[in-house]
Amino acid sequence: MTVAIRVIPCLDVDNGRVVKGVNFEGLRDAGDPVELAKRYNAAGADEITFLDVTASSGNRETTYDVVAKTAEEIFIPLTVGGGVRAVEDVDRLLRAGADKASINTAAVDRPEVINEITQRFGSQVLVLSLDARRTDNPEVASGFEVTTHGGRTGTGRCAVAWAKEAAQRGVGEILLNSIDADGTKDGFDLEMIRAVRAEVTVPLIASGGAGGPEHFPPAIAAGADAVLAASIFHFGPDDMIKQVKDAIREAGFPVR
């Protein structure tokens, strides 16, 4: 049986408010995270991803109270990331009501934390958030570089190699976000999706660049198991989740 494609609205949260920018910059207010989560839950979203976008760059903890309030209002899986650095952070998030935790910067800094978290809670609770951008650095074999701190810091590491290592260390899913495509509404970075899919078997969530329902089926054809977006849901019509699911279904892919 083929697993249904998941459609996931993303709540990028800064100081308790949902924000959205372009290429991770120029953030503007998009509303209250609890109210938006409730709206997307009712509209047919399969999951919600909640990312505290300045937790790592500001070196502070995710706002657990907002996570708890959001979890109380929705009945679909909630993934939370931003400022996750250790087993203890994941434990606290799960106790606050999250179903999965997303890790980015801390895992790049110390990859062993992936093993520690998955050995404690299982692979199914950990999502690697991989923010990648195109580079002409000859040392980055794939042409896609890992970045950290909300896309602000380049690492000189190959995104495809990092995805493969993280999968081997036990992450349950990879959220692959294109910094270059983020907020542009020009479509997902299909080349990046294909490159990572060729090296990993864990579920792949495509993120960055969705501008209309027509952009989602190509990402799935490139290898994504789930599709994530923000602007198109925050600032689009109320039935956008339905429109996206209809487009996926019409393209011949299974969807809930």
Image: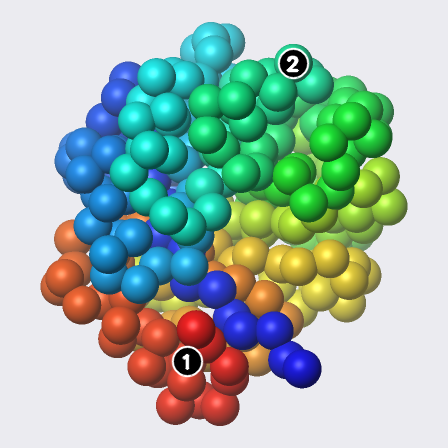
**Figure check: 243 above or below 144:** below
- From this viewpoint, which residue is outermost toward the right? 168
Can residue 109 be seen from the camera position used here? yes
* Residue 243: percent from left, percent from top: 26, 75
**Figure check: 162 above or below 55:** below
Residue 108 vs residue 252, the one in the foreground: 252
* Residue 132: percent from left, percent from top: 58, 45
Q: Earlier in the sequence, mark 1 or mark 2?
A: 2
Residue 10 vs residue 156: left or right? left
Looking at the rendered image, the quarter that the N terminus falls into is bottom right
Q: Quadrant of residue 170?
A: top right
Q: Residue at x 41, y 85 (%)?
A: 249
* Residue 229: percent from left, percent from top: 37, 55
Looking at the rendered image, the quarter that the C terminus falls into is bottom left
**Figure check: 71 above or below 44:** above
Label placed on residue 248 = 1
Q: Residue at x 68, y 45 (%)?
A: 124
* Type of amino acid under label 1: Ile
Q: Residue at x 56, y 57 (%)?
A: 205
Classify 10 Å Cα crowding around label 2: few (below 14), some (14-19), many (20 and above): few
Q: Quadrant of residue 238?
A: bottom left
Residue 68 vs residue 255: left or right? left
Q: Label 2's element?
A: helix
Residue 164 vs residue 118, the one in the foreground: 118
* Type of amino acid under label 2: Glu
Label placed on residue 88 = 2
Label placed on residue 23 = none
Q: Residue at x 77, y 62 (%)?
A: 201
The reply to whether dot 1 and dot 2 touch (C-beta < 8 Å) is no
Residue 219 vs residue 95, the one in the foreground: 95
